[in-house]
Amino acid sequence: MTLDPTATLGGRLPATLRDQFPYLAQELNGHPLAYLDSAATAQRPTAVLDAERAYLERSNAAVHRGASTLVGTSTGAFEEARATVAAFVGAGDREIVWTENATDAINLVALGMADASAGLGGSEADVFALRPGDEIVVTEAEHHANLIPWQRLAAKTGATLRWIPVGDDGTWGIDDAASVIGDRTRVVAFAHVSNVTGFAAPVADVAEIAHRHGALVVLDACQSVPHRPIDFGALGVDFAAFSAHKMLGPTGIGVLYGREQLLDALPPARTGGSTITTVTMERAEFLPSPHRFEAGTQPVSQAVALGEAVRFLDGLGMGGVHAHEAELAELLVDEVARIPGIRLVGPPPGAPRAALASVDVPGVHAHDVGQFLDAQGIAVRVGHHCAQPLHRRLGLRATTRASAYVYTTADEIRRYGAALAEVRGFFGAGA
Amino acid sequence: MSDLSGLYQELILDHSRRRVGDGELADPHASHHELNPTCGDEITLAIRLDESGSTIERIGWTGDGCSISMASASALTELATGAEVEQVRRLVDAFRTMMRSKGAGEADEELLGDAVAFHGVSKYVMRVKCAMLAWVALEACVASATARDA
Ligand SMILES: Cc1ncc(COP(=O)(O)O)c(C=O)c1O
């Protein structure tokens, strides 16, 4: 198994990249590991691991609490990470809120809106208050993280949840969105890139329609921020969520982006220490964003490590990352499409897609497909990928997903294709 | 592929294709639906007892899942049909013990018959629930059918 450095990186990125990811040097079941599950969680380069350790060895202290030299150092590192992440996504420092993960970030918006609907944010929060008759719009392709919080918000406020339908391939278009978004719509929440189909939504166009109807736009950017250049301001979204662990960073930290005026008005769903200006026995006044949302002790070393992950990606250049992945996406689709009888979910061959592919192997359950690949050292994700309604719509219960990232090689994708071609024979599911 | 043969023994692959007991059972004495939320595998298993209420006369199930879960339902049907309720309880216990063994020890072949083929599955922690699915449903059916009789 030789690694072709130009295939690894599309000739654009450093040829030594793989050496910087110790995890990838492992074997799995006696074969060199082909890690094709980065859409679930990405592996971390040594620089990111070292940055977290270096912070803990030299700079660790409480942040924003107390006045010592040590607190100055830790707080500086914490806020510098925020500025790094902000610049990475075209945001201002006050537009980046640390959360536990992307799921938590979406919940923070939905829960804040529930609070606003209950009258908790005062008149500034009116823009977030929902009433019966108002509508929340999502798509049929959402990850449960961007569906269930909105179901709950609808149930709490009497608003109606509606969804943009998807076609037989799991994708949707601007006309589908335009037919659902209307004057009653108050929020439109959707994924930039689907974690199942790899389809990229026409974000700016949807945002334009939503804003014309006075609705807020919430973007699930989990599968886009790690993989392509992003400027939330230019996209025109009001809120966005992403997770550090899918972008070479640590678990335990995610990001909520929001436009500054909106974040300053959104009621903080979680309250407590570090979020306030004045507290009496009866009530509390909250700080502006981001600190109004960051209740309690924060994931500080994780924030520092995320900052380092962003520097690492910036070093590669997100344009180059995107180009590399576009090449891998094409190869992945070619590999799958040449196997007879396999159903590829998502955009058809030739259409743009993220570097991930979910497939159904007729007659063989996804678990068995995954196990077969696992035995050959190929790690993929099987199941419904937290998108049950989408799978139901596609007439499937589970699929097998292969996903690539900066360190994925063409050779790994070819190994996947070769192994996938043998699955039906092994399980006696016909040629 | 030799590494996979411990998991996918010929007997298991064979059962996953034959699916003994696949089909809805008319007039069941008990029926139970079991779902594995992590993978979406599911089964609805039903039993009919004989007139004395002490023997399982028929088992029928409908389900959707991986080869391990479907083969396990099939092997269970073959093994438990015609067995006394007390014997079925012992079977379920023995099967569960085997599935918790992480591949260690010897399975009770005298009691479990063909179902010992699933011993190899117990090494794959992520697949144990697949193998258990039908057995958990059977256990629930037996409990509810016998509770009603009592
Ligand atoms: C599209 C999408 N949305 C949301 C999530 C949830 O991310 P997390 O579990 O890190 O909160 C994921 C990842 O699992 C995802 O792929």
Image (spheres, coloured by chain):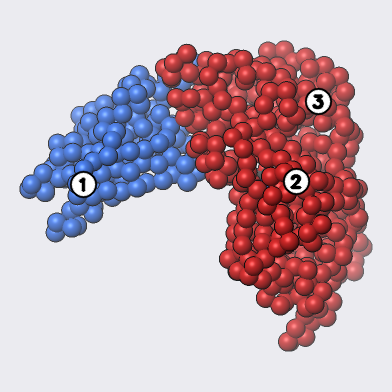
Chain colours: A red, B blue
Query: Which picture quadrant has residue A312?
Result: top right
Which residue type does callout 1 highlight?
A: Pro
Distance from disc 1 to disc 3, alpha carbons, whole Å, reads 58 Å
Please name the residue that numbered disc 1 is placed on. Answer: B28
Vertical arrangement, residue A105 with respect to residue B6, above or below: below
Judge by depth and name the residue closer to the eye, B31 or A23.
B31
Count of marks overlaid on the render: 3
Which subunit holds the residue at mark 1? B
Which residue type does callout 2 highlight?
A: Ala
Percent position of residue B124, x then y? 46, 32
Instruction: Classify mark 2: residues with Cα within 10 Å, few (<14), some (14-19) or many (20+).
Output: many
Please name the residue that numbered disc 2 is placed on. Answer: A221
Where disc 1 sits, the SS reads loop
Distance from disc 1 to disc 2, alpha carbons, whole Å, reads 49 Å
Tell me: A156 left or right of A16: left
Q: In which quarter of the image is the N terminus of chain A?
A: top right
Whether labels 1 and 3 belong to a single chain: the reply is: no
Which residue type does callout 3 highlight?
A: His
* First of labels 2, 3 by sequence position: 2
Please name the residue that numbered disc 3 is placed on. Answer: A324
CB of mark 1 within 8 Å of CB of mark 2?
no
Tell me: A386 left or right of A424: right
Which subunit holds the residue at mark 3? A
Q: Can residue A87 be seen in this view?
A: yes
CB of mark 1 within 8 Å of CB of mark 3?
no
Residue at the farthest left position: B52
